[in-house]
Amino acid sequence: RRVHGTSQVKMAALVRGLWRLPQKTIFTRAISTSCCQFASEGSNVDTVTHTGQVWDKDDYRRARFVDKDKLVNEKFAIDLIAEDPVVVCKQRVSSNSGGALGHPKVYINTDKPEVAVCGYSGRKFINTKFYDAAKHGPSVTYEQYLKEMEDIKS
């Protein structure tokens, strides 16, 4: 003989009791998973982010913006990197923006007639003999870059 726990016995009794209800009884859910637009949603709740994130008016995920605003940074990383000036240098260089606060030292080869990009910071480097202001945009010298990195560390 099998011994059932009290919760199993109660569940079985409930199921048997449901069969006794009239066939035309309609059951409704007490809690809905969808939500309506809340009066206290932030002004940016419908703003599309750089990843295309935006939700419909009846999407339950909008509930996270009740009584707070959706923070949307209008300056996307790819645009910020594009605005960063090219570092013009005379030889191969190293990119290092600060140890534990930045990334490890990376050696950049500037022997080719193209912009070399640091894989960690996205900083762009080019050799002086290949730099063209009209083509590559604004620039800083390697010495200015090193001073900027020292200022960040301190």
Image (cartoon, grey):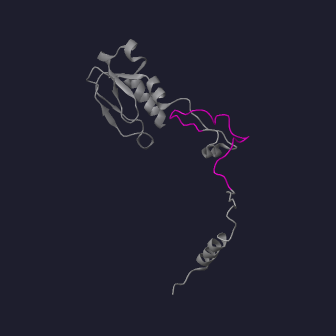
Estimate the x, y position of residue 2 in percent, counting from the top left. Answer: 52, 84
Where residue 56 sits, quadrant-wise, is: top right
Q: Which residue lies furthest to the bottom in this view?
A: 1
Task: Examine the structure image and report whether residue 75 is included in the region drawn in magenta.
Answer: no
User: Residue at image x 54%, y 84%?
Assistant: 3
Task: Examine the structure image and report whether residue 54 is included in the region drawn in magenta.
Answer: yes
- On screen, residue 57 above or below 135: below
User: Residue at image x 52%, y 32%?
Assistant: 50
Asked whether 46 or 4 is in front, the reply is: 4
Magenta-drawn stretch, dominant element (helix, strand or loop): loop
Estimate the x, y position of residue 138 in percent, counting from the top left. Answer: 43, 17
Estimate the x, y position of residue 26 in percent, counting from the top left. Answer: 69, 59
Q: Give the range drawn in magenta.
A: 31-55
Estimate the x, y position of residue 16 in percent, counting from the top left. Answer: 63, 74
User: Residue at image x 41%, y 35%?
Assistant: 97
Q: Which residue lies furthest to the left in this view?
A: 111
Asked whether 103 or 154 is in front, the reply is: 103
